[in-house]
Image (cartoon, grey):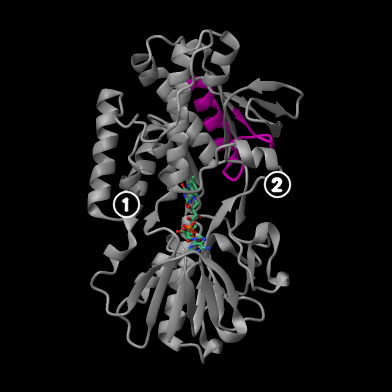
Amino acid sequence: MRVVIVGAGFAGLQLARSLNNKEGFEVILVDKVNHHQFQPLFYQVATAGLDASNISFPIRKLFQKSKNVRFRLADVKSIEADEKKINLNDGELYYDMLVLAMGATTHYFGNEQIAKYSLPMKTTSEALRIRHHLITQLENASIETDPELRKAYLQVVVAGAGPTGVEVSGALAEMKKQILPRDYPEINFEEMRIVLVEGSDRTLGAMSAESSAQSRKYLENLGVEVLTNTFVKNYDGEMVALSNGVGITTKTLIWAAGIRANSIEGIDSQVFVQQSRLKVNRYNQLDNYNEIFALGDLALMVTEKYPKGHPQVANVAINQAKNLSQNLLKYGMNQFNKWKPYEYIDLGSMATVGRHLAVVDMSTPKIHFGGFFAWLVWMFLHLMLILGVKNKLQVFINWAYKYFTYDQSLRLLFTDYQVKQPHK
Ligand SMILES: Cc1cc2nc3c(=O)[nH]c(=O)nc-3n(C[C@H](O)[C@H](O)[C@H](O)COP(=O)(O)OP(=O)(O)OC[C@H]3O[C@@H](n4cnc5c(N)ncnc54)[C@H](O)[C@@H]3O)c2cc1C
């Protein structure tokens, strides 16, 4: 059976690894980037804590010894299901079974100005762009004599107080406190503001009330201004307009406020449900398409316990892939009646705010804890999830170095970004 998997994120990669060297399967793994991206640590790349290569793993290296898994670097454009074919930017591929695992991208809710001027963080290159942008603004501020413009360079607005927004705000606040004043003695860092804007009434809305309250307290203690029940209405590259009527002058709006699935042409529009996710049955199979499956962030599986679908997290992506591989390996495509439905085992969730500051909600037993121990648990689990021994070691060394020196060494500009001339 020729299985074509689109996307080498958590789901696609897990499926390819589970089918690796399994007799009867030829696997083609397609991705538009040549490495696996570890999204949970993007915020550390964006804030100069980790190098991008530390959280990226070359896909071809993983399958060097494989007899049946091949990688293809390509952007998948559309599907022709009648012909069992996908169209790529540079060719086409035929399949017996197609697995879509393209994950999600940023959702701007139709606001073109926000899409144009804000900074998303859904890929490694976007995380690097944030890093370059932030460093450039600091260089600009260091020579700016106009106080209003200096404010614009130094104020940062983060939209969305989910884990990404909370983590990036906390990391920025720590940089402002511990590192930046040493790098930029010419800047008065009291002028730097980090404002986290959230539409609902709490930070980390998907976690327990205790985690929300604790994360907010941690952020505020670090100096982050947290605005809840407030939306970013617009941004023109100069001023963030908030729903409460306030405007914040800034060159930096980090957009962590919405996601939608990466969609693809050629699928019946009825299969697309909320935020472009593809409706699947309990075996991750698309409605009306026997040979097409969707996994992870892209898939929306309705169950009694999860009527709105599962959370878009790595655990779901990995375990849906494992379940699909088990079904395929045990029963093949001709014995659907024996397939095992996917059941989500929620192990809990966690987020970190900064040094010694994290929150953890365990699901069984239902326990919440925060602070130093939660921070250790967060670090350990993330370290375990990163692919490759070298990457694990490099991340660990970076964290240890930062822990003992209160420093990080990656504040490097590798772009042609132009530093603005000071105002006369
Ligand atoms: C900043 C951030 C922080 C996060 N933190 C956490 C966390 O702490 N814990 C947690 O559990 N989850 C976290 N998540 C969510 C988690 O990363 C996702 O749930 C998970 O990556 C979903 O896996 P996936 O395989 O469905 O998609 P992804 O991992 O997103 O992989 C999709 C792959 O498809 C490829 N692709 C997309 N379109 C195409 C195309 N047209 N052609 C070819 N290839 C394509 C992409 O390049 C990518 O490699 C975070 C996400 C982000 C963005």
The foreground one among 392 and 411 is 411
Q: Which residue is mark 1?
A: 384
Q: Is mark 1 within 8 Å of ligand 1?
A: no
Q: Residues within 10 Å of mark 1 (few under 14, many from 20)?
A: few
Q: Residue at x 34, y 74 (%)?
A: 70
Q: Position of residue 334 (x, y in %)?
A: 51, 92
> Which tag is nearer the camera, tag 1 or tag 2?
2
User: Is residue 155 in view from this perspective?
Assistant: yes
**Amino acid type of the residue tagged 2 in the rendering:** Phe
Q: Element type at marker 1? A: helix
> Which quadrant would the N terminus be assigned to in this image?
bottom left
Q: Is residue 230 left or right of residue 192?
A: right
Estimate the x, y position of residue 249 in percent, counting from the top left: 63, 20
Give, as a three-letter code, the residue at label 1: Met
- Residue 375 x, y percent position in the rendering: 38, 37
Residue pictured at 27% horizontal, 55% vertical:
388
Marks 1/2: CA–CA distance: 35 Å
Q: Is residue 63 above or below residue 240?
A: below
Q: Is residue 322 above or below residue 68?
A: above
Q: Which residue is mark 2?
A: 109
Q: Magenta residues?
A: 196-222
Which residue occupies 44% across, 11% down?
187
